Each structure stands twice: as structure tokens, then as C-alpha cells.
Image (cartoon, rainbow, N blue to C red):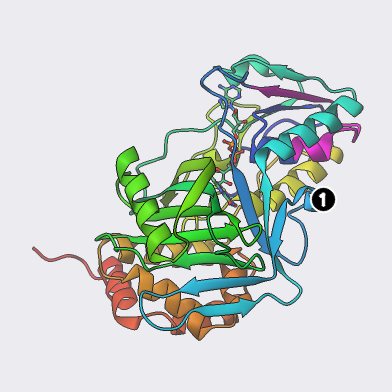
């Protein structure tokens, strides 16, 4: 949460959790002169986050991890339910992927070289780790607050596949392919990240209010493989996840000297489920403050304006006012790709945001705004 969780002063930092947030801060503080402890849940403890891939986009990066990028794409594609694909060249930008396993190995190596051991135990109460002058940066997951207007889930099953025929264009990431049945009060799409003509990560994703059963995910993913023309595949690996998409505020840690951060502090962008690049921006500021001996105060992950726009979209989608597939396809069809991706990454200014709003379906968005300002009469 913006500006929350001021704590500590000159002293050291205890990073709890070595996921996207914790690893990003530990990387920056390793060998910086800031006294550092890093604690991660042991593998097999039931608390350790499962490995995953993170994607980001932009001119460089993500953050200091450009060297860990395992695949990148100069073009992105959106496939509407009907009509022509939108394919956009990213110019100097790339859509990039890195794996949590590679980041874990790299950050542990860097910490080892700097003389910081990763301590492996389950933290139940971060207050136990406090020492005078130190700040505990707690990145453990928290239950999603139910205090927002809308809570949707971004839930998916992805397979790393080898296709029987050369089915993929390795220069193009398919961000959303809407040629799948659409759920009420949500949206569903295929997501394809090819690494060669034969291999790709292919996901079936829904933004909706309830997760599916294992059988349902598999059926939808197999159905998408057929509908998209990828056809028969050998499954090499899998990735499954549930990311809350909410306009609820995530509260700060109630414990003095403990700074809650990560997905647990609302760093996930509500309209996309992405957090990795926002975490890099926040990690830069936190590391800078720690190096300067300043209190660790969490900078906002996202601009208020963008959070408001996300909140309207989520509500319109969840209430079934907005045709999600048409909305996202229209956004990409009616705007330059850098404006859309810039907005989704939090980089656009007011003028571009207005242009994006002007290109959105007026009726559903207006009804959602009016629903907030006009008192409901019984
Ligand atoms: C499957 C999946 C894919 C995603 N893909 C993307 C993507 O492509 N791009 C993007 O921008 N965002 C993505 N996200 C969203 C977001 O970036 C991730 O959820 C990200 O991992 C959040 O980082 P975090 O550090 O807050 O949490 P985590 O990465 O989950 O890290 C939390 C850490 O705390 C540790 N831990 C937990 N409990 C304890 C405990 N009691 N004691 C000690 N340690 C503990 C865990 O082991 C873990 O290392 C994805 C999310 C999921 C679930």
C-alpha cells in the first residue's frame, strides 16, 4: 500500500521470502554494505512458492535481470473471437520471459559471493526476526483482502509442449487468443509463448470468479490446442496458477519494524495479474533507501489513476457489462501497441490514458462509473 509501513532506520535488512520481491531486493543489497539476512522457506515445507515463469516487456530489463531472460519476442499477437489477428512489432521493446528457478540460482550465487547465507526455515512471526535498527521485509503471501469492490481470479493451466508439426512462429508471443468459449462475468483466452517452431508454453487462462477443476483445465487447454491449430502435442512440463485481481487495498504489516511487500502488499496490477516489473521499480527505491540508511518506506506499486481505471474495468467485467474479449481485442486494435503495453505496465501519462479510455466501449464503462456516483434507490 502506498506510503505504508515506514519502519526502521539505519541498520540492516532481513528479507523474508526469496520469490520475485525478496530475490529482487536481495540481489540489489548483496555486497552493498547494508547488513543483510535472507530467510526462505525450505523446499518441501509446504510454504515454498512453486517455480514459475515471469514475463515482462519494455526496452530493457526486467530490472537488473536482463541476463537471465530465457526467451524474448519482438512481436506480439492478439486473436479476436472473429476477424483478423492484431500483430504488432515492438520496435526496440521485447516481450521477455525468465524462470524463477534461474533467478533463484543466480541470487543465491550472488549472495554466496557476498558472504550472505540463505537461511532456510519457515517464518511464522516476522516479529521474531526484529533487531534494533533493522527492518524485516516480509514478502510471505497473505490472504486476499475482501474489502474491494471486485475480486476476480486469473487462473490458468499451462503446458510446455512439443508439437507434432512446426506449429509456432518463434518471433511472436500470442498474448490473448479469444477463440475459446467465453465465461459469463469474465473472459477466457489462450496464451502462447513459442521458443521454436515446435516448442512453446501454451496456457488456457480465465479471468473469472471461480477456479476450474483439474479435468476442466485440461479439457479447455486440449480444446484450445485444437481450435488454434497447434494440434497434437507432447507435454514436457506444466505451470498452473491463481492470481487474485482485485481493487482491494492490501494493508501494511501491523508489526512495527516489519515492512510487508510483494503480492502481499498489492504489487500485482489488478487488470493484468502482472507484478514483476512493478516489483523491480519498488526494489530500486527500497535498496536505494537502505543504502542511504533511510527508513524503508514502500513506494506505491501503481499510479492511483491506473488503479481507478483497472477498478472500473474489473467491475464492468465481473458484472457482465463488458464483453472482455471484445474489450481487450479492441484496445489493441484501436491503439498503438506501445500505448497499450505502456499502460498495462504503468508507464503511460494522462494524455495516453485518456486516449485509451476514449477507445474503450462507452456504454459499459459509463454505466459502471454512474453506478458508483448515483445513489441506488430502492
Ligand atoms: C504461476 C504464476 C505466474 C505468474 N506470472 C507472472 C508473469 O508472467 N509476470 C508478472 O509480472 N507476474 C506474474 N505473476 C504474478 C507475480 O509476479 C508473482 O505472483 C510473484 O511471484 C509475486 O512475487 P512475491 O515475491 O510477492 O511472492 P512469491 O514469488 O510467491 O514469493 C514469496 C516467497 O516467500 C516464501 N515464503 C512463503 N511463506 C514463507 C514462510 N512462512 N517463511 C519463509 N518464507 C516463506 C516463498 O517460498 C517465496 O519464496 C505470476 C503469478 C503466478 C502465481
Q: Does residue 120 appear to the left or right of 255 in the view shown?
A: right
In the displayed structure, would residue 267 be above or below residue 228?
A: above
Given the current orientation, which residue lies at the most extreme front position?
Answer: 164
Please tell me which residue is depicted at 38% across the width and 52% down the height of the picture: 222
Location of residue 146 with respect to 93 vertically, above or below:
above
Residue 96 vs 108, above or below: the answer is below
Q: Nearer the viewer, residue 16 or 56?
A: 56
85 displayed left or right of 110: left
Q: Residues within 10 Å of mark 1 (few under 14, many from 20)?
A: few
Q: Position of residue 314 (x, y in %)?
A: 37, 61
Residue at image mark 1? 67
Q: Position of residue 104 (x, y in %)?
A: 72, 34
Residue 362 found in image quarter: bottom left
**Does residue 213 appear in this view?**
no
At 30% from the left edge and 50% from the top edge, which residue is drawn?
A: 209
Secondary structure, mark 1, is helix
Q: Which residues are magenta?
A: 25-40
- 350 displayed left or right of 361: right
Q: Which residue appears farthest toward the left when viewing the image?
A: 378
Instruction: Say whether residue 264 is visible.
Output: yes
Magenta stretch contains residue 20: no
Report the label total. Answer: 1
Which residue is at 86% across, 25% downward? 112
Quadrant where the C terminus is found in the figure: bottom left
Q: Quadrant of residue 196?
A: bottom right
**Percent x, y for residue 16?**
66, 27
Residue at image x 64%, y 72%? 75
315 relative to 323, above or below: above
Residue 206 coordinates in the image, percent (x, y): 38, 55
Viewer-side residue, 26 vs 136: 26
| Quarter of image, ligand 1 | top right
Amino acid at each position: 500500500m502506498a506510503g505504508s509501513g515506514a519502519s526502521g532506520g539505519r541498520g540492516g535488512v532481513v528479507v523474508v521470502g526469496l520469490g520475485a520481491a525478496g530475490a529482487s531486493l536481495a540481489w540489489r543489497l548483496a555486497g552493498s554494505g547494508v547488513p543483510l539476512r535472507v530467510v526462505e522457506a525450505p523446499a518441501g515445507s509446504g510454504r515454498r512458492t512453486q517455480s514459475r515463469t515471469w514475463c515482462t516487456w519494455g526496452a530493457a530489463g526486467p530490472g537488473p535481470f536482463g541476463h537471465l531472460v530465457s526467451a524474448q519476442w519482438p512481436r506480439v499477437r492478439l486473436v479476436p473471437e472473429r476477424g483478423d489477428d492484431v500483430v504488432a512489432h515492438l520496435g526496440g521493446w521485447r516481450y521477455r520471459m525468465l524462470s524463477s528457478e534461474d533467478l533463484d540460482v543466480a541470487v543465491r550465487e550472488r549472495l554466496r559471493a557476498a558472504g550472505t547465507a540463505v537461511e532456510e526455515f519457515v517464518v511464522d512471526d516476522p516479529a521474531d526476526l526484529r533487531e534494533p535498527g533493522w527492518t524485516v521485509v516480509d514478502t510471505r503471501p497473505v490472504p486476499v483482502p475482501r474489502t474491494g469492490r471486485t475480486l476476480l481470479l486469473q487462473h490458468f493451466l499451462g503446458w510446455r509442449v512439443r508439437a507434432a508439426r512446426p506449429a509456432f512462429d518463434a518471433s511472436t508471443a500470442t498474448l490473448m487468443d479469444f477463440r475459446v468459449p467465453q465465461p459469463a462475468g469474465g473472459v477466457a483466452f489462450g496464451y502462447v509463448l513459442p521458443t521454436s517452431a515446435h516448442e512453446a508454453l501454451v496456457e488456457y487462462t480465465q479471468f473469472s470468479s471461480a477456479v476450474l477443476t483439474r479435468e476442466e483445465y485440461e479439457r479447455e487447454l486440449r480444446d484450445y490446442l485444437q481450435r488454434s491449430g497447434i494440434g497434437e502435442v507432447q507435454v514436457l512440463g506444466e505451470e498452473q496458477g491463481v492470481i487474485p485481481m482485485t481493487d482491494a487495498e492490501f494493508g501494511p504489516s501491523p508489526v512495527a519494524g516489519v515492512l510487508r511487500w510483494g503480492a502481499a502488499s498489492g504489487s500485482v496490477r489488478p487488470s493484468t495479474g502482472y507484478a514483476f516489473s512493478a516489483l523491480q521499480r519498488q526494489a530500486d527505491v527500497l535498496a536505494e533507501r537502505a543504502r542511504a540508511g533511510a527508513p524503508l518506506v514502500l513506494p506505491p506499486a501503481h499510479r492511483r489513476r491506473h488503479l481507478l481505471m483497472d477498478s472500473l474495468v474489473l467491475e464492468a467485467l465481473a458484472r457482465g457489462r463488458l464483453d472482455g474479449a471484445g474489450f481487450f481485442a479492441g484496445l489493441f486494435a484501436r491503439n498503438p501497441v506501445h500505448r497499450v503495453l505502456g499502460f498495462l505496465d504503468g508507464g503511460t501519462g494522462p494524455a495516453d490514458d485518456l486516449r485509451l479510455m476514449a477507445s474503450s466501449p462507452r456504454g459499459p464503462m459509463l454505466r459502471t462509473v454512474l453506478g458508483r456516483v448515483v445513489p441506488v434507490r430502492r
